Image (tube, coloured by chain):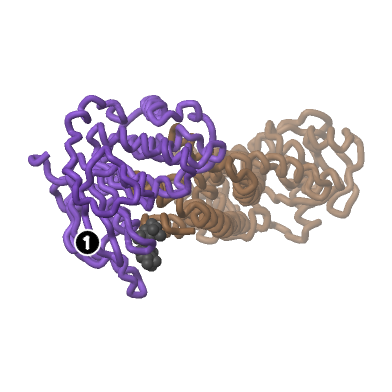
Amino acid sequence: MSESPPAFETHGLTRTFPGHVEALRGVDLAVASGQTVAITGPSGCGKSTLLHLLAAIDVPTGGSISAAGRPLGEWPDLSEYRRSYVGLVFQFHDLIPRIPVSANVELPMFWTGRSPRARRERARELLELVDMGFAAHRLPTEISGGERQRVAIARALANDPAVLLADEPTGSLDSASTERVIDLFRALRDEGRTIVIVTHAVEVAAVADVVVRMRDGVVVEADPQARPPVVLGNADGLDRQAPDGRAHRARQGRLGRG
Amino acid sequence: MTFFGLVVRNLWAKPVRSIGLALAVAFAVMAVVTLAVTSSGLEESAAAIISVGKADLTVVQKGAADILSSTIDKNELTSVRSTRGVANAVGVLVEIERINAANPAFIEIGIEPSDMAAFGVTLVAGRTYGATAAHEVMLGWRAAANLGLHVGSTFKANGTTNTVTGLFSTGNAFGDAGAMFPLPAIQGYNRVPGIVTLVFVKDVAGEKAAAVARRIEYRLPELTTIRTASQFGRADRTLVYLQAAVNGSTVLAILIGAVIVGNTMLLSLFERTREFGLLRAVGWTRWRTVSLLASESLILAVGGAGLGVGLSFMVATLLTHLPVLAGLLTPNFTADAFARALFTALGMTVVGALYPTIRAAVLPPIKAIQYE
Ligand SMILES: Nc1ncnc2c1ncn2[C@@H]1O[C@H](COP(=O)(O)OP(=O)(O)OP(=O)(O)O)[C@@H](O)[C@H]1O
Ligand SMILES: [Mg+2]
């Protein structure tokens, strides 16, 4: 882990929206490769903005982002970066309603040189992974919110990205659906994938190796936390140890790794 | 799912709008193509007058409004005849007259009996009229059949009553549907003594027709020569204007269609802004995202063009059956008409897609994602 460059590293990252809205005011953050990071903080503190910058769908007004040790500006092709380095899961509204679930999962695989047939098979495989194989031919409007979220995760994994970015993936889900999505993230984590999750939910944050707290556009705290203990409402974090889960991550190797 | 499948899905999601756009394109294409094929038909029937003579080249007045208003006087005819390389020159007067509702544009040719052989006319019944006879006429065999007349019948034309002395054949459908009169008689009826409309030059004595044509044009600058249908415009300004009108209305159709295509594309863009942001976020490039939108319009345009040609075919056929137009319009569906249909449809798509495409291309993904 120490040899490979961090999945992300930001320095003094700022994003000011028109009208002097300073969504980010100098974020310094490092996400190690293979780490699972939860970003929490009050509404409006800039979590989504940060995630969008990491996903390269927005451009910072200041500071720098490196991914895999390379400044984003030096990536030759940002479309390729969005397609293959990161997989992004939005909070809601992110499936195209008029095409079937499986076609939605195929979307990132267009223009990757895969044949339509290979795309279809891969989509099928991913849907099986998130237990959504049964709904492959349904329209997104014909499945539940929790199921949609699992489909969105399948889509984010389409090109086997190094990093999975998720913005409040359980924000609109009931507890049963939330539990299934958490299981999925836990499995992905154990497989060694780098994950950044923006979440308000304590039980989602509990999956993370590190919990990053933000307020008013800056990181106020970055706590390593122990796993597996899930201590609801525990705020001290002092007696936790650095994670040592790498060993049993290797056993998995199944999720999304095609 | 393939890219094409995606395009079709997107179109099918808004069937009324998609069909509406295709129909708009189809109507524009129909208008343009109908105009083009009917004017091409007009051009062809005008050009047919020339083909009646089976000549190596035809001499007409330069820049006449239309070929039938060409005037060539006796001296000019003599000069043409005496031009080196010209073995035989036949001067004819051509008039178009409305005989009845079924024959709104009946062709009447004034020609000397002695020129008939050179003109390619053969007698099939009765006798030839006298060179200076009045009130005598010969009918083409088709005209006789159409009018229900035969040798000995009377035929009212040019304000006079004429006796049918014989029936002729030229081997040309257009000529066979007309009548022939003694030249001085028809010149008299039309008060143009000594004037002919066209001079058919035959047997250019082993020389290239082009060389003889140049010689005639040099000696008689008021006249011009026609050897092919495409040279017809030299003698018939009306057809030139008609062609210009067809081209002008094509441009107009493209502009109007472009507004419709552009509007529809913008509407799609606004409705699906978030979706385009999503595609960008999952790694589609700007242009690939835009090409999705553009392909949707392109498919509707090409479909609309096909439909438009079909509609035009129906409308043109319908027009030829309208009593007021019967016998005047013969739509001429050429490859050019199909090319024009495609050009019109693609033109309106390209022009109409310009603004929405640029707009979609410059849209930052984050703006699209945050768009509500
Ligand atoms: N396009 C924009 N234009 C102007 N201001 C914006 C824009 N996007 C976000 N903001 C502002 O930036 C700040 C941070 O927004 P962001 O969406 O990152 O918050 P968040 O932490 O994700 O909040 P939540 O938990 O409610 O999702 C907010 O004050 C928001 O109003
Ligand atoms: Mg947010």
Total numbered badges shown on the rendered structure: 1
Give how far across and how far down residue B100 sits, in percent.
87, 47
Q: Colour of chain A?
A: purple
- What residue is drawn where x is 58% and y is 42%? B13
Q: Quadrant of residue A52?
A: bottom left
- What residue is drawn where x is 65% and y is 44%? B41
Residue occupied by mark 1: A27
The one nearer the camera, A141 or B94, is: A141
Amino acid type of the residue that numbered disc 1 sits on in the rendered structure: Val
Query: On the picture, is A211 further left or further right than B325?
Result: left
The one nearer the camera, B79 or B293, is: B293
Q: Is B165 drawn above or below residue B290 in the view shown?
A: above
The one nearer the camera, B191 or A185, is: A185
Element class at badge 1: strand
Query: Is any part of residue A250 visible from this angle?
Result: yes
Give how far across and how far down residue B84 sits, in percent.
47, 47
Query: Is any part of residue B76 visible from this angle?
Result: no
Q: Residues within 10 Å of mark 1 (few under 14, many from 20)?
A: many
Give how far across and how far down residue B5 sits, in percent.
49, 34
- What residue is drawn where x is 88% and y is 33%? B150
Q: Quadrant location of the N terminus of chain B? A: top left
Dividing the image into four quarters, tell me where ligand 2 lies: bottom left
Q: Colour of chain B?
A: brown
Q: Chain of mark 1?
A: A
Q: Quadrant of residue B247?
A: bottom right
Give how far across and how far down residue A63 sits, in percent.
19, 63
The one nearer the camera, B101 or A42, is: A42
Query: On the picture, is A81 further left or further right than B157?
Result: left
